[in-house]
Amino acid sequence: MPITRLRPARARPLWVAGALVLLAVSMIAGLLGGAAGISPWQVVLQAADWLPFVAVDSGLAPIEKGLLYELRLPRVLVAAVVGGLLALAGAGYQGVFRNPLADPYLLGAAAGAGLTTTLVIVMVPAPVFSIPVAAFLGALGGVMLAYVLGNTAGRSGGTATLVLAGVAVTSFLTAIQTFVQQFKVEELQRIYSWILGDVGGGWDQFWLVLPYAAVSATALLLHGRMLDVLSVGDDEATALGVHASRVRLAILLAASLATAAAVAVSGLIGFVGIVVPHIVRRLAGGSYRMVLPLSLIGGAAFLVLADLLARTLIAPAELPIGVVTMFVGAPFFVVVLRMTRRAAT
């Protein structure tokens, strides 16, 4: 199933500027939204007061300032980082597999993270810090298992073989996770709460994910030109002097690191890696030198807005953010599938 035909990136500075404006607006909206009755103008003044070399009296009480700084601000930042990583990883996977339906969880990352997190919850007492570490290791382990299996089963490690290996690994690890859950049924609610996603982990989660986000995002953004070359086919890429298998492995590792880091702090949040890159390609063309940075920024804005909906739709109660992205992503996935089939016929 081919991805949308490669077109030159158009008006790069204008698209990037527009995406940054969208991200800024979404983050301000994320700070404004919530069950606490704080004036929007006071929130704006307080946000200005956080800027370097700016001193503004917002008129907020200390407890209200604490709510904004300790709860809303890190939540918005974690949502932005996680959304950006998932969308960027999705664009990277779609470029490697030349398939618009490829997803950050395609190669077993979600299943690996789910299994190790379940093991920690069931077997380790009071795993406060262990869950992100377990999810991170599990996601990377699932991806590496799928990659090794794909290379072992296929002579050249082709994309179709890797996808099938990812499906097999996901099914196997999910079966083990379901089996493990039966040993501690009373923890099912906690396990499923993590599986449905949460970006409210505070500053600790933000600082935990930031180094991995910086490394993986930089690596993926630097490979935009290589993905453009791979999009014309491995033989053509080899003729141009590009070692396709090495480039593919580097992008897979960077995308998997991004996915693992996002999963470690937020749980399983689906469809971001499908929805955002597809919209970006439709609007700005198929060049990955444009798709990758716009997916990073657009994914950040998308998940911040999704989290805002999760916090406000049934306030003062709260929806899991994964439920919101499923409501948006599942119908979008069907639309992309239909468009892809139509383009192939």
Image: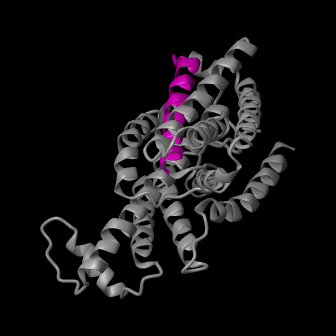
Q: In this view, does 340 lie above or below 247?
A: below
> Which quadrant is the C terminus positioned in?
top right
On the rendered structure, is 303 left or right of 147?
left
Q: Residue placed at 53% from the left, 62% from the top?
A: 302
Which of the pair 24/214 is nearer the observer?
214
- Please state the horizontal and vertical placement of residue 253, each as a whole percent of the image: 52, 28
Q: Identify the residue at horizontal 75%, vertical 24% (top origin).
A: 161
Identify the residue at image location x=36%, y=88%.
39
Can residue 326 be found in the magenta stretch?
A: no
Position above or below: 41 against 164 = below
Which percent across, then down, holds residue 107? 66, 33
Image x and y of residue 154, in percent: 74, 15
Q: Quadrant of the N terminus?
A: top right
Which quadrant of the figure has residue 121?
A: top right
The residue positioned farthest toward the right in the image shown: 345
Q: Magenta residues, as a range?
A: 241-265
165 up-or-down from 83: above or below: above
Q: Is residue 24 visible?
A: yes
Decide if residue 291 is on the left or right side of residue 60.
Answer: right
Query: At x 54% / y 48%, what residue is drawn?
Result: 86
Image: 284 above or below 226: below
Where residue 164 sits, quadrant-wise, is top right
Q: Is the magenta stretch mostly helix, strand or loop?
A: helix
